[in-house]
Amino acid sequence: MDLKEIQNLIKFVAKSGASEVKLEMDDIKITIKTASEDGKETTFVQQMPVTPQVVAPVQPAPTAITPAAVVEESASDDNSKYITIKSPIIGTLYRKPSPDKPTFVEVGDSIKEGDVLCIIEAMKLFNEIESEVSGKIVKVLVDDSSPVEFDQPLFLVDPS
């Protein structure tokens, strides 16, 4: 598990609202404790058999305004009739099944429930993201090969 994967895990736990998460693998043990209501410090503990325990404070992730969030806020009145398809996981979004293949969906494409919209890679696993609604793709909010957060808007769909 590399540092980027650990950082993504910390961000995910901080957003999830869980108070403590423990992860044990072959040669690594990770415990993430989030701040309680009274504001006590959040800690990240990584322990390996050969090395001593490392403890570092974890600050809650600052609320960053992404370009997608800015577009969504400024056009919220216009987009209220559309359904927003959001990311169910943290990872890297790919709009194509492979670099030499066409994209799964484009603006203007009609989709139905169960159609694959994109793939999100999380910890070396490729997860197909399927549509839960039928309609027409109005807007693609994320670029190919870009990182996405949990619950980040990905597509706008016109259900009519």
Image (cartoon, rainbow, N blue to C red):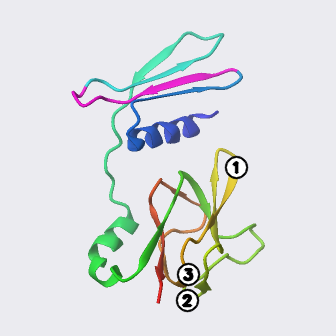
Q: Which mark is residue 39?
A: none
Helix, strand or loop at label 1? It is strand
Q: Is residue 93 above or below residue 111?
A: above
- Residue 83: x, y in percent? 43, 76
Near mark 1 (Cα within 10 A), the count class, few <14, some 14-19 or many ≥20, is: few
Q: Nearer the viewer, residue 82 or 95?
A: 82
Nearest the viewer among 156 and 71 is 156
What segment carries the magenta color? 27-39
Q: Give whichever of discs 1 and 3 has the lower sequence position.
A: 1
Residue under pointer 2: 108
Q: Is residue 26 left or right of residue 122?
A: right
Give the main secondary structure, helix, strand or loop, of the magenta stretch: loop
Instruction: Give whichever of discs 2 and 3 has the lower sequence position.
Output: 2
Q: Identify which amino acid the numbered label 2 is placed on.
A: Gly
In the picture shown, does residue 86 fall above or below 100? Answer: above
Secondary structure of the residue carrying tag 2 is loop
Would you say 62 lies left or right of 128 here? left
Query: What residue would you read off at disc 1?
Result: 125
Judge the density around disc 3: few (<14), some (14-19), many (≥20) Cα neighbours within 10 Å.
some
Mark 2 closeness class: few <14, some 14–19, many ≥20 residues within 10 Å? few
Q: CA distance from mark 1 to mark 2?
A: 29 Å
Foreground disc of the pair 1, 3: 3
**Residue type, mark 3 in image:** Ser
Could you say which is closer to the camera, residue 28 or residue 85? 85
Q: Is residue 82 left or right of residue 73?
A: right
Q: Nearer the viewer, mark 2 or mark 3?
A: 3
Q: Are marks 1 and 2 in contact (CB under 8 Å)?
A: no
Determine which residue is flagged by label 3.
Answer: 134
Residue 54 in picture, x, y percent from top left? 49, 16
Q: Residue at x 47, y 36 (%)?
A: 10
Distance of label 1 from label 3 (alpha carbons): 26 Å
